[in-house]
Image (spheres, rainbow, N blue to C red):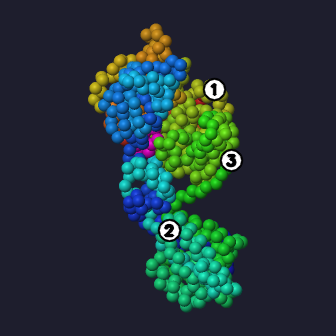
Amino acid sequence: MDRRVYYNLVSVSEAIELIEKYFKLEPLGVEEIYLENAYNRVLAEDIYSPIDYPPFDRSNVDGFAVRSNDTISANEYNPVKLRLKGYLEPGYKPELTIEKNETVEIATGAMIPRGVDSVVMIEYCEKRGGEVYVYKPAYPGENISFAGSDISRGDIVILRGTKITPEIISILAGLGLRKVKVYVKPKVAVYSIGNEIVEPGLELVDGKIYDSNGWLITTWLRNNGVEADYRGIIKDNYIELYNAIEKDLNRYDLIITSGGTSKGLSDIVYRVFNDIGEPGVIVHGLKIKPGKPTVISIARNKLLIGLPGFPLSCYTILHLIVKPIIYRLIGLIEKQNNIIKSRISFRIRKPLGITWFLPVVLLKNNNEYTAYPLTIESSSIYSIAWSDGLAIIPENTDTLLENTYVDVLLTNSLDKIPELNIIGSSDYLLTKILVSTGLNNYSRFLFTGSTGGWYAVKRGEADIAPTHLLDEETLIYNKPFIDKFDLRNKAVLIRGYIRLIGIIVEKNNPKNIKSIRDFLREDVYIVNRNKGSGTRVYLDYVLKKIALEENIDFYNLISRINGYNYEVKTHSAVAIAIKQGRADAGIGLGVVAKIYDLDFIPLIWEEYDFLVKKTSLDKKFVKEFIEYLRDRDFMQKILGEYRDYYRLQSDTGFEITV
């Protein structure tokens, strides 16, 4: 290819395209390193969680583990008296079971024993000998972090191309990973060019200036995971610069200089760059100001970049040219900090006197951002990994109403916020579809349960809401809720697939559980799904039928079910509770029972469809998602090992007539 003519000005994008013709802008290799050496490196692999986090139900506070139903009547004037069964500390698996009107003292971080569903803080309790007086009622799940509620085994936790920060290291360590695969760091030599430049710390005489560019470039490169060496100052001397660069071509992947890039008699960088190797200078001048006299050369399969000498010009090109090149060489996905105004999605309540920095994900709707709060629990590592920012709630505020605007300190670049918002029911096959198609790189998936997804579409926050809501009146999935949520002219239902749900039980079914009626047995303890989830709606529907058949009140019926108030947010959490012996049974997906090697009693094939906001139907990634659903060959391939638990419909991917 012919060399570029000096000062044949090109745009920044054209300059990058020219570089790509001669030099591969891709990572230079992969290496595996220990975690203690991983800071500021870039992950070369997607990280799938090898464990559930937390790995067990654990207490968030020092207090007393109780059955919430035992504390309903408790208040400061009439405390509830419970029999104390001992003390649980972190690091040990409880061997005891807490029965009605019993409690056990528990330390922060200790494993929750069988039989309880909440923890009352020690401040609201009084221990008298072998008894504990509780002065405050507890609600199910209070002060407990449930197993897998933060991260489930097999979840994609961190994506390839993520810079490893202290927060990421904490996640990797929390998941038990000792080594990680990272991209090889490019080696870069940095020079400052000019007779007028002197080292900082030396005496400054007339006509001289201190070198700032060399330090700027070197520290910026190091901060971005590059092995950069500041090689010092070289005078405007052709031979001296030529010899220095020729030597370094054998040691470094890139050479970056600042100064000496114009066409003046003393500006020799472009001449050295052109003479030192083929093809030579490919760019000499950009159509921008500042930063016009930029030189880019390829020599001996190495990349040479000459930045302008004026500091502002140097800084501008560092971001416009060097930054995208370096990021592609190290596979980095950029994150940056700023403060923006964002609308809060939910009502938030907090105590006065403290400032909250609430982890949020940002959902983009037209030109406005909505902050969707994540958990503020200190035990959570999921929120740290996936939040876009921290919503700042001042100390003098105790309530934020929905749609209130708040300041959000960004921990992620706004440019990297996914364009496709998926809010609703979680599903293994859906995750597989998104990952296999690459749509996971452009989508935000929030697991709120089916009902939460319908509300998110109604508020305009979700593009797609996965749903499997059963209407108890018609026994039809999803369709009746179009009118119930007043969405007939605002959203459409796209046919998904059916999936098998049933009762998950311990291996070999030691309690001989055969149906949901067995949940009423005194020797059976269940784990339930959260309110608003489609699975919970189905279970309650069946229990209401049983109550009608038995001629008893529904609430009286569920009060007889051990563990009904033991609520978890995911199918995985149901399986974990059973696997670890905290429950005997729960309703969940058949595929989850398979993954956790548990027994499964099939109940029903439920319809898992996709509610799509009408104004989102023309979005690129929404259309792609629907096209993938319609592709029968692709979907059959995706089913793979899951085909015993999932089936396609004849109209999968097409609009459902409502």
Give the residue at mark 3. 341
Mark 2 → mark 1, Cα distance in angstroms: 56 Å
Give the residue at mark 1. 483
Give above or below for 145 relative to 200.
Answer: above
Report the span colored magenta: 147-155
Give above or below for 436 relative to 501.
Answer: below
Q: Main secondary structure of the magenta part?
A: loop
Badge 2 crowding class, 10 Å Cα cut-off, few under 14, some 14 to 19, many 20 or more, is many
Q: Position of residue 636 (x, y in %)?
A: 43, 42
N-terminal label among 2 and 1: 2
Q: Looking at this view, name the residue that lies furthest to the right.
A: 289
Kind of residue at badge 3: Lys
Badge 3 crowding class, 10 Å Cα cut-off, few under 14, some 14 to 19, many 20 or more, is some
Residue 578 in view, yes or no: no
Kind of residue at badge 1: Asp
Mark 1 → mark 3, Cα distance in angstroms: 34 Å
N-terminal label among 3 and 2: 2
**Which is closer to the viewer, label 1 or label 3?**
3
**Which is closer to the viewer, label 2 or label 1?**
2
Instruction: Residue at 35% x, 26% y: name it.
Output: 85
Secondary element type, mark 3: strand
Q: Position of residue 366 (x, y in %)?
A: 68, 46
Q: Looking at this view, name the residue that lies furthest to the top.
A: 551
**Which quadrant holds the C terminus?**
top right
Q: Which mark is residue 226?
A: 2
Give above or below for 238 relative to 64.
Answer: below
Mark 3 → mark 2, Cα distance in angstroms: 34 Å
